[in-house]
């Protein structure tokens, strides 16, 4: 009675007369009483979205730098025919006009669906009948950071929560011993946007992407910085726990103290779990080979793709893999003829292996694989040998998770410059992804600075689910 | 054919209409109905607009006689009748929830807070001093909170000493301070002593830097260092230490360069406006220019006025009485600002001999500012003149030119914000200070005092404080601290019922406390930021490793956390994990999360290991080899109290079995260490 601050809320709850259960009561107490927040999640326990779900987890193979669609999966005969001709297209960054440049690479129809794939992606092409290509992606930011934030968070400005953060905010995780949202990357490179690619923005930091490494210790500080005698770690944790329990008796109502005690236990479980669950050597030689772990060119990316499969198999909700080195891998402003094949060789086999392996284990149905960069590239040349950034038209590849297979959606113009048919915006893509996970994109909101914010922000972006992509 | 579709549609609708809700939980007004009313009804039938003279944004406002009409309209297939008229129709689930709620006689909480008409909104009303309530408590805060009732008891002397130290200077009391307090025992003199110490500014500047979205780099692709931006950080520390009146503090940050008597200091202060992220190679320079102005307008209005005007960039704010005209009128205030840079190189400006990181205004002629249609830089609409949000004033302040080198627009805005008649300014800052001391604001949304913000739990107390702060305390933050800290409310033991809340220390205070306890803290003040060591793995094998992060050496590396370099693209992992403020926009309150990487960082991380070793060495040095004396000293340094018998037994046994160093590591990880009583 002596605390009016607490009283007002309690009073309110008591007087509602709506028979709130304990869970609702806790949720209300935890909330600021603001409009719009339909989820009050402050933990990572598994939960369901508002709609029936077709998939449980997502693997985002993010292709930093912007892969060239007309050299990989959006063939343009007209571009070949009119090679060398000047048109009214300007390079986005360089600002100049140059001539149309035909793809130097051959295309071939693959699988029963007959989807055309470049000769640079032979293995991914083998998976054609399992893939759903969206050839009509577009946005407006021609810069690496802006484009990356756009794809990762739905907005070209930095600071908004990433897709993975929204997903685990909405759904939690099915594995409490591992992070719910994992980022994997080659330690040699951190692309444009840095850790902002997996940021929680203004969502609670519980929902941030955690970086796991595929070599050495998978988590920062997983082991003590200095070697300790055997048993010392456990004994120290035991003492900590006892002293904390002793202290907590004085504060029976403080749930945060309890949470912090449990957290040290989780960390300790993670030390054990991470070591065994993330040990790739437990995989058969055959599997390791499938992912190209036996080949220097594919080993690093292959390890990440294999790790991604192990993670979703263990209930991790969202895995984001960044492209292999160099910095902004696909950013081929020059010499695309030799650079593109080299990079494709690193990425093609592991990407295809991931899809094959998920399918063989029956995991592809419940896993969405999304293969996309921050934009595509220009049909005109840059300096005669390369291609500049192009956000007006590019391709996203989807597999599994209830998406159509052996399917092509949308089209760019005759040169591959702009998305013209069945255009799909980035927020549309996000809305569709969330839909498959059982989340209504307009209703997964979080109150921030007076607004009910969401990943897709439909009031501003007009985002909608692209039903044509769904099986 | 068309008819067939209609029939099908009607069938579908009636089927949807009869569908039961898929979840079994009983209808819950707060969860199922209120958000629906706000999202789908309030924009036409709410506080801002009342079409058909109806308000439907709260259960209490819906006249019983129109309930059936609502259900009819929601289900209608006639486009001219259907509600809501814009956007998709209600989902089957929503419609069913509404029907179920109305069938249950539309219950809502008796004391439901109903949004008022904007002009009547509490925070837009002038600040008047309410009379002190009749109370047996002399302290005004206690009088408001406890009235004729009893005040809670005081926490123990040791707990209060530690609390006041961590709260005001972010460092635990030393043994000498503990001894002095034990003999003299006057908390008021401790408060005064701490407020007079330079560490006070180092602690409280960090709270303001959160609001000011401070960082040392620009973010984006190159994430280059902001040259000399640390002078702004030092300015904040000194302003707080000198107890610069808050109204003056406001004016200097918004218009320090436009003052009639500008100094080096006031020019540095105006760097506030330039702390945001900057894209040094924007793809669309015109749009980018408005992004930068948006950062300035949004931060300024949130920081000082507690208004979220950023939403009005693309369309009139749907939930606040703020229009695009209001927004672009504020843009017009800042539009004359120019960013000094040479290509992708960010530049400081010279003020006398000193490099200062601030914008520049060079002419009394302002560029034209237009409303941008849907926020698009390529679609200018009507031209606007500088103005403050219309809802807040009867008469606009005069935006008059200011000599030849600037338009004087910012000065006019700053003076209006800092004026005693501004209804928001004092309420907002008083609430920020309260939030920091008590763990939870009187208004829980510290940067949102608008219609959608939280209501004050104690409106009269807030107004009394705001009025007292301006008129009695003359905008002195130190007097405000003193007032709050001398209340029984603040000095109570923390528990679920107490006004003062149990809350984890911020990462800066955790790190600084560790350094203080281990004896390694380097008190060197001011100047360029330092870079603490970060786990190699975080940047391992990065081709630009050296360029990205070169760790500072000792003793530089053991300085206080306020001097840590904040790089937008690479936040020190320990800071990031422990909930440092996101520097991309103004932060109203730190989050407190509990995730496994925090435990790993604090238990296994190199920083803790180093401090544990130094802590153990210190104990041996100062307490000798006697384990009991070591334990006592450790407990007093870290927790400001003697260990209990149980604790002492456990610790002795552990030290004998393991090591003193291992024990120190455990102490630095204790809940009590980071959650001060």
Image (spheres, rainbow, N blue to C red):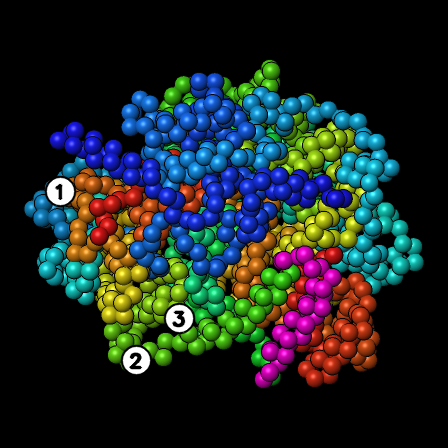
Q: Earlier in the sequence, mark 2 or mark 3?
A: 3
- Structural distance between the alpha carbons of marks 3 and 1: 42 Å
- Residue at the spot x=59%, y=53% of the render? B592
A327, above or below A232, in the image? above
Q: Identify the image quadrant of residue B410.
A: top right
Front residue of A65 and A385: A65
Q: Which residue is mark 3?
A: A214
Give how far across and how far down residue A310 sits, in percent. 36, 70
Helix, strand or loop status at disc 1: loop
Q: Which chain does tag 2 point to?
A: A
Give how far across and how far down residue B526 sits, in percent. 67, 50
Q: Which residue is mark 2?
A: A284
Q: Nearer the viewer, mark 3 or mark 1?
A: 3
Q: Which chain does tag 3 point to?
A: A
- Residue at the spot x=58%, y=17% of the render? B396
Q: Earlier in the sequence, mark 3 or mark 1?
A: 3
Magenta residues span A230-256
């Amino acid at each position: 009675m002596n605390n009016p601050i607490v009283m007002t809320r309690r009073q309110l709850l008591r007087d509602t007369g709506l028979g709130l259960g304990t869970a609702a009561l806790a949720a209300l107490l935890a909330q600021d009483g603001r409009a719009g927040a339909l989820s009050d999640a402050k933990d990572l326990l598994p939960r369901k979205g508002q709609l029936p779900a077709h998939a449980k987890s997502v693997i985002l193979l993010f292709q930093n730098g912007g892969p060239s669609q007309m050299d990989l999966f959006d063939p343009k005969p007209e571009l070949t025919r009119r090679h060398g001709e000047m048109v009214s297209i300007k390079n986005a960054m360089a600002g100049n006009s140059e001539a149309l440049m035909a793809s130097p690479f051959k295309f071939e129809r693959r699988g029963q669906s007959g989807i055309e794939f470049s000769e640079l992606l032979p293995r991914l092409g083998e998976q054609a009948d399992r893939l759903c290509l969206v050839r009509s992606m577009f946005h407006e930011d021609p810069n690496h950071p802006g484009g990356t934030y756009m794809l990762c968070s739905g907005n070209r400005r930095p600071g908004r929560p990433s897709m993975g953060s929204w997903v685990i905010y909405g759904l939690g995780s099915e594995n409490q011993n591992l992070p719910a949202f994992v980022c994997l990357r080659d330690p040699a490179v951190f692309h444009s946007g840095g850790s902002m690619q997996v940021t929680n923005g203004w969502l609670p930091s519980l929902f941030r992407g955690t970086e796991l490494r595929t070599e050495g210790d998978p988590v920062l500080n997983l082991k003590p910085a200095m070697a300790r005698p055997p048993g010392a770690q456990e004994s120290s944790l035991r003492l900590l726990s006892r002293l904390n329990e002793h202290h907590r008796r004085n504060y029976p109502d403080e749930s945060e103290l309890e949470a912090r005690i449990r957290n040290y236990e989780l960390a300790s479980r993670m030390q054990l779990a991470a070591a065994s669950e993330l040990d790739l050597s437990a995989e058969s030689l055959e599997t390791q080979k499938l992912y190209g772990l036996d080949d220097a060119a594919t080993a690093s990316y292959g390890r990440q793709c294999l790790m991604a499969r192990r993670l979703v198999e263990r209930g991790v909700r969202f895995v984001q893999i960044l492209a292999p080195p160099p910095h902004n891998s696909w950013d081929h402003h020059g010499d695309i003829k030799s650079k593109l094949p080299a990079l494709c060789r690193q990425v093609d086999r592991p990407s295809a292996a991931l899809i094959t392996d998920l399918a063989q284990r029956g995991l592809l149905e419940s896993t969405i694989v999304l293969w996309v960069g921050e934009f595509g590239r220009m049909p005109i040349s840059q300096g005669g040998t390369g291609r500049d950034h192009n956000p007006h038209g590019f391709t996203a590849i989807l597999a599994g998770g209830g998406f159509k297979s052996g399917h092509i959606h949308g089209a760019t113009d005759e040169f591959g410059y702009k998305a013209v048919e069945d255009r799909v915006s980035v927020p549309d893509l996000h809305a569709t992804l969330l839909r498959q996970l059982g989340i209504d994109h307009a209703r997964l909101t979080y109150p921030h600075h007076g607004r009910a914010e969401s990943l897709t922000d439909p009031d501003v972006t007009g985002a909608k689910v692209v039903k044509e992509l769904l099986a | 054919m068309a008819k067939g579709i209609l029939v099908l549609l009607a069938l579908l609708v009636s089927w949807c209409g009869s569908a039961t809700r898929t979840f079994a939980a009983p209808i819950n007004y707060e969860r199922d109905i209120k958000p629906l009313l706000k999202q789908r009804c309030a924009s036409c039938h709410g506080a801002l607009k009342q079409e058909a003279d109806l308000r439907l944004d709260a259960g209490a406002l819906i006249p019983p006689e129109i309930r059936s009409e609502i259900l009819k309209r929601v289900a209608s297939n006639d486009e001219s009748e259907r509600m809501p008229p814009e956007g998709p129709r209600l989902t089957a689930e929503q419609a069913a929830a509404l029907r179920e709620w109305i069938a249950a006689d539309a219950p809502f909480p008796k004391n439901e807070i109903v949004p008022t008409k904007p002009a009547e909104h509490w925070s837009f009303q002038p600040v008047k001093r309410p009379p002190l309530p009749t109370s047996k408590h002399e302290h005004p805060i206690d009088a408001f909170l406890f009235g004729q009732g009893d005040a809670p008891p005081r926490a123990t002397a040791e707990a209060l000493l530690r609390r006041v130290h961590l709260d005001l200077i972010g460092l635990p009391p030393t043994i000498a301070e503990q001894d002095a307090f034990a003999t003299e025992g006057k908390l008021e003199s401790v408060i005064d002593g701490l407020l007079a110490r330079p560490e006070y500014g180092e602690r409280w500047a960090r709270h303001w830097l959160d609001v000011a979205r401070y960082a040392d780099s620009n973010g984006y692709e190159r994430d280059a260092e902001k040259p000399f931006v640390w002078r702004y950080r030092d300015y904040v520390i000194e302003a707080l230490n000198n107890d610069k009146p808050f109204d003056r503090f406001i004016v200097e940050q918004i218009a320090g360069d436009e003052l009639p008597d500008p100094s080096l200091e006031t020019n540095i202060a105006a760097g506030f406006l330039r702390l945001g992220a900057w894209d040094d190679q924007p793809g669309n320079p015109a749009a980018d220019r408005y992004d930068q102005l948006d950062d300035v307008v949004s931060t300024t209005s949130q920081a000082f006025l507690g208004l979220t005007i950023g939403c009005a960039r693309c369309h009139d704010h749907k939930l606040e009485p703020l229009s695009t005209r209001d927004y672009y009128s504020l843009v017009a205030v800042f539009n004359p600002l120019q960013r000094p840079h040479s290509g992708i190189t960010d530049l400081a400006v010279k003020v006398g001999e000193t490099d200062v990181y601030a914008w520049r205004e060079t002419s009394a002629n302002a560029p034209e500012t237009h409303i941008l249609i849907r926020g698009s830089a390529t679609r200018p609409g009507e031209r606007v003149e500088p103005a403050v949000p219309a809802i807040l004033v009867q008469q606009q302040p005069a935006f008059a030119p200011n000599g030849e080198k600037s338009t004087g627009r910012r000065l006019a805005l700053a003076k209006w914000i800092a004026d005693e008649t501004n209804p928001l300014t004092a309420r907002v800052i008083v609430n920020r200070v309260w939030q920091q001391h008590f763990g939870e604001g009187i208004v829980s949304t510290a940067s949102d005092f608008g219609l959608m913000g939280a209501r004050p739990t104690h409106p009269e107390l807030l107004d009394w404080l705001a009025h007292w702060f301006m008129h009695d305390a003359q905008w002195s933050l130190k007097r405000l601290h003193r007032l709050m800290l001398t209340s029984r409310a603040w000095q109570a033991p923390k528990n679920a019922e107490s006004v003062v809340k149990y809350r984890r220390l911020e990462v800066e205070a955790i790190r600084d406390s560790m350094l203080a306890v281990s004896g390694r803290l380097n008190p060197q003040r001011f100047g360029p930021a330092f870079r603490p060591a970060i786990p190699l793995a975080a940047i391992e094998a990065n081709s630009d490793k050296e360029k990205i992060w070169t760790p500072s050496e000792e003793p530089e590396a053991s300085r206080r956390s306020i001097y840590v370099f904040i790089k937008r693209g690479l936040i020190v992992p320990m800071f990031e994990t422990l909930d440092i403020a996101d520097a991309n926009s103004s932060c109203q309150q730190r989050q407190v999360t509990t995730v496994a990487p925090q435990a790993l960082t604090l238990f296994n991380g190199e920083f803790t290991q180093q401090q544990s070793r130094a802590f153990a060495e210190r104990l041996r040095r100062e307490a000798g080899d006697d384990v009991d004396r070591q334990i006592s000293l450790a407990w007093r340094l870290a927790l400001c109290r003697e260990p209990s018998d149980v604790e002492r037994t456990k610790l002795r046994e552990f030290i004998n079995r393991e090591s003193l160093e291992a024990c120190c590591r455990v102490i630095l990880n204790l809940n009590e260490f980071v959650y001060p009583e």
